[in-house]
Amino acid sequence: MIVAELIGSSSGIGHMITDSQALLNTGQIIFGIIVIGLIGLVSDFAFKSLNRRLFAWSVL
């Protein structure tokens, strides 16, 4: 989703990173990357938890 946002969006995290790259604002680029990483980490934990609850029989 972030890749699609980087390519053709006028708002959002990906757009903020692209604009910051053009303006050489390194701090904002790093902040955007950290936010993307945190979103990925939280969604990974959420999907793992959901998987354990829905498919408790398949956990070894």
Image (cartoon, grey):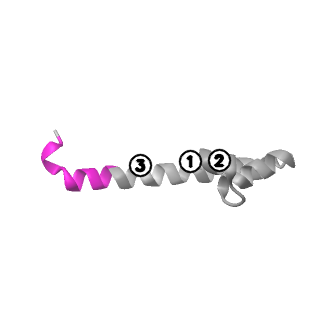
Of residue 57 and residue 1, the one placed in the foreground of this image is 1
The residue under label 2 is 33
Tell me which amino acid carries mark 1. Answer: Gly
Q: Give the magenta range.
A: 48-59
Quarter of the figure with the C terminus: top left
Residue 12 rendering spot, x and y as whole percentages: 66, 59
Secondary element under disc 1, as helix, strand or loop, is helix
How far apart marks 1 and 2 lie (CA) works out to 6 Å
Q: Left or right: where does residue 2 sit relative to residue 10? A: left
How far apart marks 2 and 3 lie (CA) works out to 16 Å
The residue under label 3 is 44
Magenta stretch encompasses residue 11: no
Secondary element under disc 2, as helix, strand or loop, is helix
Query: Do the residues under discs 1 and 3 have CB atoms within 8 angstroms?
Result: no
The mark found on residue 37 in the picture is: 1
Residue 35 rendering spot, x and y as whole percentages: 61, 54
Tell me which amino acid carries mark 2. Answer: Ile
**How would you classify the magenta stretch by its main secondary structure?**
helix
Which residue in the rendered view is the most extreme toward the right? 23
